Amino acid sequence: MNAQILSYLHDHLDDYLADLRTLTSVDSGTLLKPGVDWVQDWMQARLEELGFAVERLPQERLGDNLLGGRAGRGGKRVLLLGHADTVFPAGTAAARPMRIDGSKILGPGTCDMKAGLLAGLYAVRALDAAGFHDYGAIHFLVVSDEEIHDRGSLPLIRQTARVSDVAFTLEAARANGDIVTARKTAVWATVRVEGKAAHAGVEPEKGRSAIVALMRHLIAIDALNGFRPGVTVNIGRIEGGTQPNVVAEAARAELDLRAWRDADIPDLLDAIRAQLSSEVLPGTTAHLDVKLEGAMPAMERTPAVAALEAATQRLAGELGFSVTGASTGGASDASFVAAEGVPVLDGLGPIGGLDHSPDEYIELDSIVPRTALLAMLIAEAGREE
């Protein structure tokens, strides 16, 4: 069967490239609903051609979400997960159309993640060509808002994960070819400090600088980096005061908190709150605002994930290349799947890099072998009882 999969993908590489040119010719930045919906229209038509029952979940402001499902002859239920949105503004596709430069394919959304969406489609097509249907079901979920913080698709991702047994995320493989087997949890929090305003020249002694208090707190908060293995605290943005001749009455800082384990975040928040309760400048008060709902959970490398990684390495060896599982602090929708207890691998698209930049690319020579690897993984994971 593996030879049939490879043969199909080699024979249809030109079709894949034509489809990629089509998809990257449309601006689909998250807030460009018509463009995102165009991509979803295109994906829906291709999924329906493959016999998927497709549910279109409309959204008023953002692009629609898309969920396709197709039953097999038995075995496990496999989830393929991707997103239709990019980060690029209107006009980017026309200004930088897809081009092939040696071994690289450049263009907006090539790596993140239109090439990955196509890898999912062509993997299913290759399995069909090989006559393989020994899976319980294939769910193909394409969300429209992966590139922004305030999202509406998270309940849909979690619900779809709950009716799946194993998942593969169609983000590109890392630039060195690694897949991703672990990701950190990510939580954003805001420190707010209140002081007392006063004239900085006439009677500064009557003021209490919220900025000074905030800076003293932040020095201590920054020292919490590494208080558990892998815990990071980034002070990403600071605001305060009104103008130079006024003692600052208010100040705030925005934090990015990350850890390998979800369980480390509550302890980190407690440590920050303990610091904010200390009196660093009399007459000032400090508070912590944190929104845990919608925060990115950790994708932990469980024994089930390790088994998937081992299977991936073995199958890659059969295709003539090696694969390594990597851990990263970056976020992905795979984390929301993992939070539902479903084993998931990330980075099953072609090899690529420089996401979100004018030099974003995928490697031409990686398309066939990486899509074949995805198809073989679907087959191996899906056939298991």
Image (cartoon, rainbow, N blue to C red):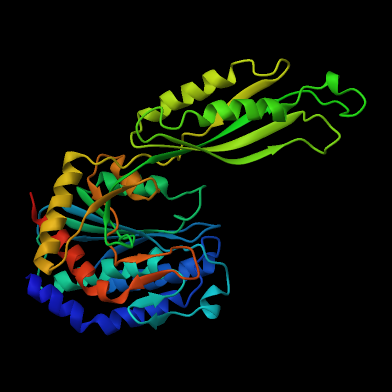
Res 50 visible? no
Which x, y percent locates residue 72? 14, 60
Q: Residue at x 35, y 79 (%)?
A: 19
Q: Residue at x 51, y 76 (%)?
A: 93
Q: Residue at x 74, y 23 (%)?
A: 195
The number of callouts visible is 0
Q: Going by the image, does 172 lie left or right of 204?
A: left
Which x, y percent locates residue 286? 64, 23
Which x, y percent locates residue 167? 24, 52
Q: Nearer the viewer, residue 171 or 80?
A: 171
Q: Nearer the viewer, residue 198 or 288?
A: 198
Q: Nearer the viewer, residue 269 or 160?
A: 269
Q: Is residue 93 above or below residue 250?
A: below
Which x, y percent locates residue 242? 80, 37
Q: Is residue 286 above or below residue 59?
A: above
Q: Nearer the viewer, residue 175 or 154?
A: 175
Q: Is residue 357 above or below residue 79?
A: below
Res 281 visible? yes
User: Which of the 4 image quarters holds residue 216?
Assistant: top right
Q: Quadrant of the N terminus?
A: bottom left
User: Which of the 4 image quarters holds residue 252?
Assistant: top right
